[in-house]
Image (spheres, rainbow, N blue to C red):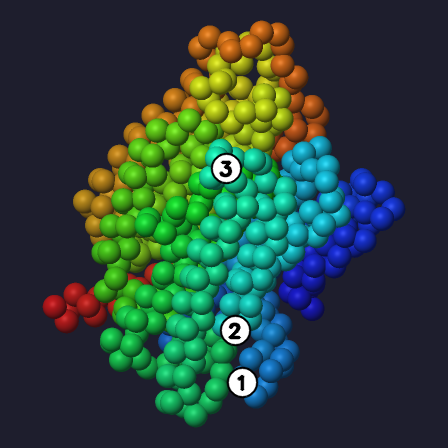
């Protein structure tokens, strides 16, 4: 029963937060903090006690470290089917950690409708955990759509005011339309797969293990794979489906940005690894050069556009597009090393992007602007924050000793034997990354001061958050072995699906 509790705890906690506002303004905050701490502790306990040598692989029924099955809508073959392997375990722990941080970073920022805010925050995180655990495709889609509505409210009700024609309502609506439309494409692809399986077996089911056995004609497989890919590409985000991301990040409250960059983007990478590649290996192998090309384009484009930004949150948002490009290349490389690098990069980017957005939020609270042209001269006038920002900017550009370096290095070294030119072009992203990261630090913290006088430094709560993230990022960079061991079996299964299909494709040509 521990798997359903991982999902139920945030949902129940959210309802308690909503009702707790009647009694005290601070009670919802403490309930939310306790809820996410409980989720994190349960996740860490599962990680410590689980056997992660079990994972889905081709040619056999999927094996899981933990599994929960309960009949739901029998007539359509829909079950409450949850399962856990190394990949989903790491993502659940990351969700718990960033959930705790998103509650802490909104402690002083959110002063209106506190209970309803924490209800939405908890329900986003509950939906995300559901996405990472669901192995019934209808249930996966249910959680995939469910996390959109609370995120819409988070941006629309508690977001920052934007420039003319770029308000928080516009950003929230844009986010909702993009993700909702892509979700409908995925639903059509899921139904198409289910009906093809039904025509072959006479059994109506949404079960992952059964659908893996479906025999698909090449044209049908490519179309269905494309449906899944487009849906995940919007959330990833892959260019040209990325335009909702900078607006959503710029207007979202700090907690919304932390969840969006740290966790919601990872649901797309998880979806590709768990569903798109294993269900459609031949079509994915055929599509791999295009996907890797899109990844390279995202790396270079995201870095160049980051360089041109004046809004510090938009700069960090576009840098996320660039960093996620490495993960896209790794997923379609067919290399075990690159796939494990993608998992490390997902966690490292989750930690570093969350930290940068927390620091942007703290900067905004003190300066009341996100425009770097109105900053400057802060280094000597504010203790701690500029130095910590410099560390995370360096981590984001792939500084050795941080998790980002390990992830990007594994991705590049694993991809090189399969696609040397892709690797060479992707490597330019590391150079461009150093340019926009250091430009951000220079514009925001150095140069002539726009205002005089000292600025308020970080308090204990804020400092503990960012230093904790810095410590985890260094630990991941110096000793990534636990993450690599946990993800090894899961990534080996994905690699076998894709590499077998790539081999067949080459021999057919």
Q: Secondary structure at mark 2?
A: helix
- In the image shown, does 14 or 407 lie closer to the viewer? 14
As helix, strand or loop, the secondary structure at mark 3 comes to helix
The single residue placed furthest to the front in the displayed view is 164
Residue 464 against residue 494 in the figure, above or below? above
In the depicted structure, whether residue 96 falls above or below residue 11: above
Q: Which one is earlier in the sequence, the residue at label 1 or at label 3?
A: 1
Furthest-left residue in this view:
509
Which residue is more in the foreground, 32 or 388? Answer: 32
Residue at image mark 2: 138
Dividing the picture into quadrants, the one containing residue 508 is bottom left
Q: Is residue 424 above or below residue 6?
A: above
Q: How many marks?
A: 3
- Residue furthest to the right in view is 23
The C terminus appears in which quarter of the rendering? bottom left
Residue placed farthest to the bottom in the image? Answer: 202
Q: Residue at x 81, y 41 (%)?
A: 25
- Looking at the rendered structure, the secondary structure element under dot 1 is helix
Q: Which residue is mark 1?
A: 76
Q: Which residue is mark 3?
A: 250
For the residues bearing labels 2 and 3, Cβ distance under 8 angstroms: no
Q: Position of residue 23 (x, y in %)?
A: 87, 46
- Which badge, 2 or 3, is on the more N-terminal residue? 2
């Amino acid at each position: 029963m521990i798997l359903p509790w991982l999902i139920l705890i945030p949902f129940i906690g959210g309802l308690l937060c909503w009702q707790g506002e009647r009694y005290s303004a601070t009670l919802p905050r403490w309930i939310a903090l306790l809820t996410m701490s409980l989720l994190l502790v349960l996740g860490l306990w599962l990680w410590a006690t689980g056997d992660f040598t079990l994972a889905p692989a081709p040619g056999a029924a999927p094996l899981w470290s933990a599994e929960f099955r309960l009949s739901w809508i029998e007539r359509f073959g829909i079950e409450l089917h949850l399962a856990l392997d190394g990949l989903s375990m790491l993502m659940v722990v990351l969700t718990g950690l960033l959930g705790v941080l998103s509650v802490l970073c909104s402690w002083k920022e959110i002063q209106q409708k506190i209970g309803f805010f924490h209800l939405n925050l908890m329900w986003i995180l509950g939906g995300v955990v559901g996405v990472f655990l669901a192995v019934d495709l209808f249930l996966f889609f249910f959680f995939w759509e469910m996390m959109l509505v609370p995120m819409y409210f988070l941006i629309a009700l508690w977001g920052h005011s934007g420039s003319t024609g770029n308000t928080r309502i516009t950003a929230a609506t844009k986010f909702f339309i993009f993700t909702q439309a892509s979700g409908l494409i995925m639903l059509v692809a899921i139904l198409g797969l289910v009906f093809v399986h039904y025509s072959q077996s006479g059994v109506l089911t949404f079960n992952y293990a059964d659908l893996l056995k479906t025999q698909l004609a090449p044209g049908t497989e490519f179309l269905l794979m494309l449906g899944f890919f487009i849906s995940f590409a919007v959330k990833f985000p892959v260019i040209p489906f990325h335009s909702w991301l900078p607006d959503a990040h710029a207007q979202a409250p700090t907690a919304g940005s932390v969840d969006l960059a740290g966790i919601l983007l990872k649901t797309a990478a998880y979806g590709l690894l768990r569903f798109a590649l294993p269900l459609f290996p031949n079509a994915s192998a055929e599509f791999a050069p295009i996907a890797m090309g899109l990844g390279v384009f995202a790396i270079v484009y995201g870095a160049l556009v980051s360089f041109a930004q004046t809004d510090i949150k938009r700069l960090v948002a576009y840098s996320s597009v660039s960093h996620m490009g490495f993960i896209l290349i790794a997923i379609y490389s067919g290399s075990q090393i690159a796939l494990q690098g993608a998992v490390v990069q997902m966690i490292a980017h989750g930690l570093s992007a969350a930290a940068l957005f927390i620091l942007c939020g703290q900067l905004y609270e003190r300066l009341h602007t996100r425009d770097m042209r109105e900053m400057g001269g802060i280094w000597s006038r504010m203790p701690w924050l500029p130095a910590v920002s410099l560390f995370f900017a360096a981590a984001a550009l792939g500084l050795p000793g941080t998790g980002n370096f390990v992830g990007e290095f594994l991705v590049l070294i694993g991809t090189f034997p399969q696609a040397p030119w892709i690797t060479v072009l992707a490597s330019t992203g590391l150079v461009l990354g150093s340019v926009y990261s250091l430009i951000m630090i220079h514009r925001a913290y150095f140069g002539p001061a726009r205002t005089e006088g000292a600025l308020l430094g970080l308090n204990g709560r804020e400092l503990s958050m960012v230093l904790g993230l810095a410590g985890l990022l260094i630990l991941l960079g110096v000793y990534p072995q636990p993450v690599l061991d946990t993800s090894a079996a899961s990534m080996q299964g994905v690699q076998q699906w894709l590499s077998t299909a790539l081999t067949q494709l080459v021999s057919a040509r």
